């Protein structure tokens, strides 16, 4: 499933920094400086004194200069970022992170060639520093995958303890290449992954529809970081989508009953887990709760309808299905068809057959009014439902109208071909079997054979059955 789960937001695992500026460790103050530079990138206002004090304390520390350079880079002050990198190199010519910073400046200026040159410098001068290799591979991941792979292999050789597979997966994850990200995440050691990388792994599994792996990763992460609601939520979602409803329910209840902020999606997935496990009455309760929190999430209404249908309460199922179609401007033709089928089932059961037939046809009319491009779908469904309900003349009316529309059309789509094939087959059968009129049935079955030369029913109707092989005994 490559589409994102809309309501799911992984938290940014960032902590505030409040230590006084004149602390001995630059890591304790760079956060304040970075925040100030976001508001004042040129450091001419509020950030000016913070930067001045920082420089006074840490100017001789190459790592501190790179950290300041990255703060400038985040504020798109490229000149100052380069100045900081140069100061770091002046103090230590083999400090790879300074060259990586210069490469990052070029990358943000969209000059991949220059960026790669600086990353190459970092690799050559500081071969035990993984940042140069990873940045170089990131530049080449699309332009030259082989070049990127060579850099990563060199990193594996020079820094064997570096979590290369996890970080390579991160590169592909951030670029939206979830298939490749999944490939590398699966190679990595999940027990060594940081909290943020576990989140990316679980989201990647969800994106590529590997719900079993997504559940496994999310469960592991939830046990390590129980305070992080995102992992509990991901375990619930992967459980539901992977039809592991027991786990889906367990993590949904942990989320709903825990000290977490809840949203409508949480209750919707809880309802889906319960419905999957056959607990429809409680599922309806959760879907209603979800809809009360977000009355634009119309899928809850359809889910309520389906649960009522599973409970055998057809009237309630119809009520919510109608409500869903009326409210949802994006309802699909298949969903209109689902409502029509509820009425058709009543017709087949002999329950107010005429009234329910008209209601079913009205559903299709509403569909065509909302979505005029579904006219062929509507004609076929009306005719097909009439055929099923043994309303032969009604079926002939709708199906022959569709046949006339499609039979001489060139370059039929697969959908149109299926409509034409099924319509001719059903009309042919009505004339041949119900009306005992093979002459009228013949052209319809001939069209069936034109579309499907192996169709056994058409061959039998036209007398083209292959004779059974004779058996002889000696």
Image (cartoon, rainbow, N blue to C red):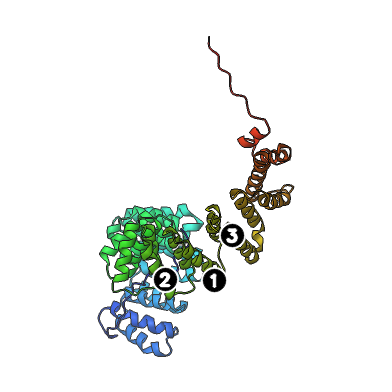
Disc 2 secondary structure class: helix
Between the C-alphas of marks 3 and 2, the distance is: 26 Å
Image location of residue 313, percent across then percent down: 44, 61
Tell which of 88 and 229 is nearer to you: 229
Tell which of 327 and 5 is nearer to you: 327
Please give the residue where the numbered disc 3 appears in the rendered image.
Answer: 360
| Neighbourhood count class around disc 3 (C-alpha, 10 Å): few under 14, some 14–19, many 20 upward | many
Please give the residue where the numbered disc 1 appears in the rendered image.
Answer: 327
Q: Is residue 133 visible?
A: no
- The residue located at (67%, 40%) in the rendering is 448
Between the C-alphas of marks 2 and 1, the distance is: 15 Å
Tell which of 135 and 39 is nearer to you: 39
Q: Can residue 158 be seen in this view?
A: yes
- As drawn, is 383 to the left or to the right of 169? right
| Neighbourhood count class around disc 1 (C-alpha, 10 Å): few under 14, some 14–19, many 20 upward | some
Number of marks in the rendered image: 3
- The residue located at (63%, 27%) in the rendering is 466
Image quadrant assignment for residue 276: bottom left
Between the C-alphas of marks 3 and 1, the distance is: 18 Å
Please give the residue where the numbered disc 2 appears in the rendered image.
Answer: 288
Q: Considering only vertical position in the picture, is 230 above or below 72?
A: above
């Amino acid at each position: 499933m490559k589409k994102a789960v809309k309501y799911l937001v992984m938290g940014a695992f960032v902590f505030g920094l409040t230590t006084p500026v004149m602390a001995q460790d630059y890591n304790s103050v760079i956060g304040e400086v970075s925040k100030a530079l976001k508001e004042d990138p040129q450091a001419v206002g509020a950030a000016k004194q913070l930067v001045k004090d920082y420089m006074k304390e840490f100017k001789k520390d190459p790592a501190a200069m790179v950290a300041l350079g990255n703060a400038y880079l985040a504020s798109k002050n490229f000149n100052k970022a380069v100045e900081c990198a140069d100061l770091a190199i002046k103090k230590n010519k083999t400090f790879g992170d300074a060259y990586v910073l210069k490469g990052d400046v070029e990358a943000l200026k969209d000059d991949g060639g220059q960026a790669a040159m600086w990353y190459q410098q970092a690799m050559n001068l500081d071969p035990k520093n993984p940042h140069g290799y990873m940045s170089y591979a990131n530049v080449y991941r699309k332009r030259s995958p082989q070049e990127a792979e060579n850099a990563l292999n060199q990193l594996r050789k020079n820094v064997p303890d570096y979590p290369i597979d996890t970080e390579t997966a991160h590169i592909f994850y951030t670029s939206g290449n979830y298939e490749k990200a999944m490939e590398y995440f699966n190679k990595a050691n999940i027990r060594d992954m940081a909290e943020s990388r576990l989140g990316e792994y679980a989201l990647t599994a969800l994106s590529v529809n590997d719900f079993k792996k997504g559940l496994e990763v999310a469960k592991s992460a939830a046990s390590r970081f129980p305070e992080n609601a995102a992992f509990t939520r991901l375990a619930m979602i992967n459980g539901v989508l992977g039809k592991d409803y027991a786990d889906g329910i367990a993590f949904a209840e942990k989320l709903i009953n825990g000290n977490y902020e809840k949203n409508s999606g949480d209750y919707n997935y809880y309802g889906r887990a319960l419905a999957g496990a056959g607990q429809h009455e409680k599922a309806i309760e959760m879907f209603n709760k979800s809809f009360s929190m977000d009355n634009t999430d119309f899928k809850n209404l359809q889910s309520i309808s389906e649960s009522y249908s599973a409970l055998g309460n057809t009237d309630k199922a119809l009520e919510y299905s109608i409500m869903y179609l009326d409210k949802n401007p994006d309802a699909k033709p298949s969903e209109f068809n689902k409502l029509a089928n509820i009425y058709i089932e009543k017709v087949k059961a002999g329950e107010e057959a005429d009234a329910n037939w008209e209601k079913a046809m009205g559903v299709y009319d509403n569909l065509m009014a909302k979505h005029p491009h579904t006219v062929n779908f509507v004609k076929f469904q009306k005719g097909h439902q009439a055929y099923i309900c043994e309303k032969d003349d009604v079926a002939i009316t709708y199906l022959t109208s569709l046949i006339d529309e499609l039979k001489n059309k060139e370059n039929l789509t697969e959908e149109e071909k299926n409509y034409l094939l099924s319509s001719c087959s059903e009309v042919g059968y009505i004339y041949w079997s119900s009306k005992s009129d093979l002459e009228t049935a013949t052209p319809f079955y001939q069209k069936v054979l034109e579309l499907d030369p192996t169709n056994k029913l058409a061959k039998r109707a036209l007398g083209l059955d292959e004779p059974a092989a004779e058996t002889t005994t000696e």
